[in-house]
Amino acid sequence: MRSFRRSLVCLTGVISVASLFLLLRASPAYAQVQNLCIEELDAGDTSTTELCTADQPSCTSATPACVSTGTNVDWNQIIGNTGAAGSAPTPTSGYGAGGQSSGVLPSQGSVFRQGTKILDPIATWVFSTGASPSKATLTNGIVASYSYTGPSLPGAAPQTGDEIIYYVVTRSSNNGSELQGTWFLVNALTPTPAGCTKNCSFIGAHATGDLFVLSTFTGGGGNVGLALFQWTGNDATGSLSFVESAQCSGANGSLACGEVNAGQVTNSFLGGTLATGLFYEGGVDVTQAFTTAGAAVPCFSNVLFESIASASCSPSSCSATNFTSASSLGNAEAKGFILGTFNTCHADVTKVCGAGSGDQSTGDIKFPISGILSNPDGSTLTFSSITDSAPGTISGDGTSGLDPGSLVCSKDSSCTSTDSACGACTTGLGSCTGLTLGAAGSGTDKICYQATFTADSTLCADKCKDTVTAKVTGPGNSTLSATAQASCSFTPANAGLDVIKQCQSVLVAGSSGLQVQVNTKYTVCNEQAAPLTGVTLIDSVVAGPSGACPTGYTFNSGNNSCTKSLTPSLSSLTAEGNTNDCATATSSYIPVVLPSDTGGTCPNGTFQDTGTATGQCKGTLCQQATGSNCSLDATTGQLVCKASGSASCPLCPLAAPTAFPSPTEEPNT
């Protein structure tokens, strides 16, 4: 490994050499941004296995030299095979989670008009196509962001979750000392008009949260110092305020660090081989830079690298200590620049999927979802859309995956405090269109959303996982997305039937005299929560000699019975306890054989018959209730429930036919 400012060569696996490296290397009391085991500031070293130093949880001020080994991310890995923008890779070990990378940003070949000052409003910036002096000509820039995942360190040193930004800028000549500035801008910055080559300007404006990092190079460019500034206010009347001066060596817990290469660096996307002093890289703990100043942490949309000339000090002696106030920047002029997109804004979203309800007519399940969309940064975001992707979403839900008209939002604080509060929210619900998310901690940085989606129960039922995607518009009309996944719950409804039978045996006049007639009434009731469809009813009586059956009945040799299909008053039954949860059917027949009973007061005069009812529900939406008789039809996918009811109909004592009283419904057992 080659680490600039150090001539020691470390061979992987050679413990004694590595130990010597650690003994010779000065270690600060608490980690700076170059020692976080994320992106090692080593001026483009191409090796993948690095030694890095970082404070461990056991570190104290008395034992500051805490050392660990880890695999950092190198700039060659960030640049990749194309030099294009994308995600910054996460170190395979160490203390960082990858964020965004700008890719390699080449020089536009433009320079600011003479007299353009650092402190001037962007509205007054003017540039033209042209070349800067060689030592002020910037050739390439790169930016990458990370989230620090290591242990929180004492004081203003990095804390777990801090946003760390690393950047590179290269120049064409190292023939003198120079100043270099890097703007991280909240608002988008766009040159105008398109294709302009002379007296061109920008669309954009300074905003509270703009971060300016001034880097000084002395001793031929080999010694680097930094000064951090924050912009407060609007473009016209706002101003920069000083945050901190920093250097990599001798500064404990610094919020920033910068170094230049002490030897040649080679990378095809950065112009091939770069001589000593042409490759500069820096790092800033953005979170601490703002929180230590009591300001909200912003998100950025653009980065601008610029070369600077200042009369505040001689180029050969300029250092960060020359710039400890905004006034010290007053006469600093901008020269060449590199402008690029670098969006660090993001949004967070949560999701809760509630218990679904089944639709027996379609076989679909409707699920309620809710969650909180929030802004973790210091810029304002605007709601764009929420979509849901669940397996088997019905076509009626369209591209959004949500039931039409179901999406509503609320910014009421009683609804945005927790996910459960959002799910139960009834206050302030309305259209989500145009709602804004204020800066984190502003009290307006959260939106509660509610919606429903409907899905095929064969594809999305209990424990079905789906993903919600929330999109917002950030600075510069950038589109930001956040996703969250939840597991949906669905409990199939219990299913079961009950049949109640009533009957009368009476004498009626027939064509050849009096004859016995049995009048029957069946009441078929849904005894459970699952609605039932396709309700059928079969009446069964004892067959006579040689399979004789009453008129309208069919002989069944299997059990020596005669059966007849009856038509219930309803073919579908609602859930128990609702209107239309019971159906009735009546019938009558002339028996063809005397009953076989011999006891009681009416020997051979007690007729009996049985009614059997069936009803069905979608097998994915219902289940057999305890005590019920149901089975799944593998062909149709329907759960078919069956129940029977019998009654004795004595002929004695004789009675005139009367209306049946209302039955007393009993549970089916």
Image (cartoon, helix red, strand yellow):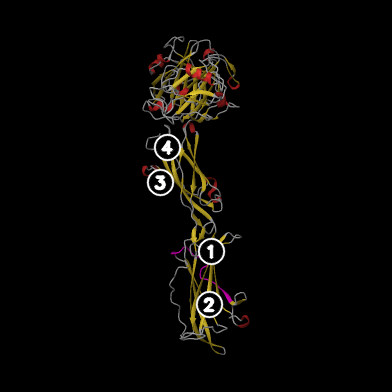
Residue for badge 1: 630
Q: Does the magenta stretch include residue 634?
A: no
Label 2 element class: strand
Mark sitting earlier along the chain (4/3): 3
SS of the residue at dot 1?
strand
Which x, y percent locates residue 519?
Answer: 51, 80
Q: Distance between the residues labelled 2 and 1?
A: 23 Å
Instruction: Rate crowding at label 1 as few (under 14), some (14 to 19) or many (20 or more) other CA atoms within 10 Å.
Output: many
Q: Which residue is identified by label 3?
A: 420
Indicate the secondary structure of the residue bearing disc 3.
helix
> Residue beneath label 4, please?
437
Residue at disc 4, secondary structure: strand
User: Please, what is the three-letter code of the amino acid marked with disc 4?
Assistant: Leu
**Disc nearer the start of the sequence (3/2):** 3
403 or 617: nearer the viewer: 617
Q: Which of marks 1 and 4 is nearer the N terminus?
A: 4
- Please determine whether, in this image, residue 495 is positioned above or below residue 316: below
Tell me which amino acid carries mark 3: Ser
Q: Do the residues labelled 1 and 3 touch (CB within 8 Å)?
A: no
**Prevailing secondary structure of the magenta residues:** loop
Question: Mark 2 or 4, which is nearer the eye?
Answer: 2
Do the residues under discs 3 and 2 have CB atoms within 8 angstroms? no
Asked if disc 4 and disc 3 are in contact, CB closer than 8 Å, the reply is no
Task: Check the picture and name the quadrant holding the N terminus.
Answer: top right
Label 3 packing within 10 angstroms: few (<14), some (14-19), many (20+): some
* Gap between marks 4 and 3 measured at Cα: 20 Å
